[in-house]
Amino acid sequence: MDESEQCAQGSWAGALGQSWAARVEAMHRQLAPMAEIGLAALAPQPGERVLDLGSGGGETSRMIAEAVGPGGRVTGIDISPELVEIARAAGAGLPQLSFVLADAGAHDFGETRFDALFSRFGCMFFDEAEAAFANLHTALSPGARAVFVVYTDIAENPWAAVPAQAAEAVLGPAPPRKRGAAGPFGWSDPDFFAPILKAGGFGDIAWEPRALSVEVGYGDDPDPAVRAAALMLRIGTVARRLQDAPEGAEAALAPVLAEAARPYVSDGAVRLGARVWVVTARA
């Protein structure tokens, strides 16, 4: 099974979504810096209607809902039942916020029209990306703005590259990634994603690189390197490789990942670099 099969929309509706939901707070901490820069670019205003693509546990949707206020409307859409359930519970106190369990690439948005489209790492998993963004375009008002936060190449993202390289000692070399394959690095190349957006009806497409530091870790082990390994084993590039690994590989890999993470311990947590594109466009 290659990365594109493992990361397609269907897997988010199953095991991948379940694993993320079980560690949703750890992932919120890890992705918080990306939410901050993405929402700064979006700049949601009171009264606006915003669609949050791949809303996950609802963190970014709640932040947008607070910005647009009771006169606005925010709809989060995600394909994972477990994550939508978490998002709905967490957002219950915000009447302007709702969540839809659906494949955004095929969902019928009816007569609803949004003033803005936002996504933090929710747009790189469509198998039929051009059709998906054409469908999303139908849900936007003319001139609506769009902001997407996506990863650049894995080599520029130590949060993924460090465990991936360490895992090779146990799992062997990773298979080559196909350009544009659905997955976390599927939109790493602007020459790939810009034509998708253009074909979907978007214009004024631009992108800006941003470098960040993210906290990696899950659980209550006193050793932050062990906590980092615990998350790496369940979510990310190593977790995907473990799906097809022989028995015993996970146990052998855990201490290897912890040692690889140890040099990055700072202030009681493992902190690794990340690099993203902040992509902007207009409907």
Image (spheres, helix red, strand yellow):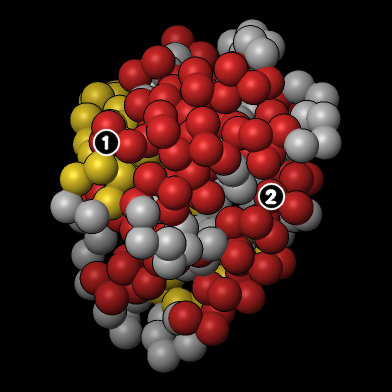
* Residue 3 image label: none
- Give the crowd class for mark 2: few <14, some 14-19, many >=20 residues within 10 Å: many
Asked if 26 appears above or below 158 in the picture, the reply is below
- Give the crowd class for mark 1: few <14, some 14-19, many >=20 residues within 10 Å: some
Of the two numbered discs 1 and 2 in the rendering, the one whose residue sits closer to the viewer: 1
SS at mark 1?
helix
C-alpha span from label 1 to label 2: 26 Å
Asked if 252 appears above or below 173 in the picture, the reply is below
Q: From this viewpoint, is residue 239 visible?
A: yes
Q: Residue at x 76, y 37 (%)?
A: 248
* Residue 264 image label: 1
Which image quadrant for residue 22? Answer: bottom right
Q: Position of residue 217 (x, y in %)?
A: 41, 52
Asked if 272 appears above or below 50 in the picture, the reply is above
Residue 44 in the figure: left or right of residue 153 = left
Which image quadrant for residue 132? Answer: top right
In front here: 84 or 76?
84
Question: Where, quadrant-wise, is the C terminus in this rendering?
Answer: top left
Q: Position of residue 9 (x, y in %)?
A: 72, 43
Three-letter code, disc 2: Leu
Three-letter code, disc 1: Tyr
Q: Which residue is mark 2?
A: 16
Q: Residue at x 19, y 45 (%)?
A: 266
Q: Residue at x 78, y 45 (%)?
A: 10
SS at mark 2?
helix
Asked if 190 appears above or below 99 in the picture, the reply is above
